[in-house]
Image (cartoon, helix red, strand yellow):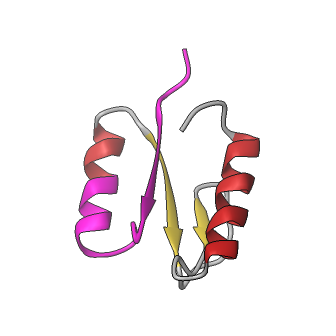
Amino acid sequence: MSKPVAVIVGGRTGIGAASACMLTQRGFRVITVSKRSTDTDDTYCCDISDPEQVESVFSRISSKEKRI
């Protein structure tokens, strides 16, 4: 059985990072979305104030993951 997937916006610092850590400890595969990053398997670059970027990043995530 595959791990559940969580997407956290702003998951690199502060509350987002703490949430990512907690979810990872609870068995989730965590994907972070951050304005200041480069795309990797678990991190995507996206300015969430831009609806086109949000649609694009979730489309890319959805194409790789069965469930979010």
Q: Residue furthest top?
A: 1
Quarter of the image where one finds residue 2? top right
Q: Which residues are magenta?
A: 1-20
Q: Is residue 19 left or right of residue 46?
A: left
Q: How many marks?
A: 0
Viewer-closest of 3 and 53: 53
Q: Residue furthest front?
A: 51
- Residue 43, image x, y percentages: 58, 63
Residue at horizontal 49%, vertical 28%? 3
Question: Looking at the picture, does residue 31 appear above or below residue 17?
Answer: above
Quadrant (top left/top right/bottom left/bottom right) for the N terminus: top right
x and y percentages locating residue 67 in the rendered image: 58, 32
Query: Is residue 30 toward the left or the right of residue 47 in the image?
Result: left
Q: At which x and y percent is residue 19?
A: 27, 55
Q: Residue at x 60, y 76 (%)?
A: 46
Rendered position, 23 above or below 35: above
Q: Residue 42 in the image: x percent, y percent?
A: 58, 56
Q: Residue at x 36, y 43 (%)?
A: 24
Q: Residue at x 25, y 47 (%)?
A: 22
Is residue 17 inside the magenta stretch?
A: yes
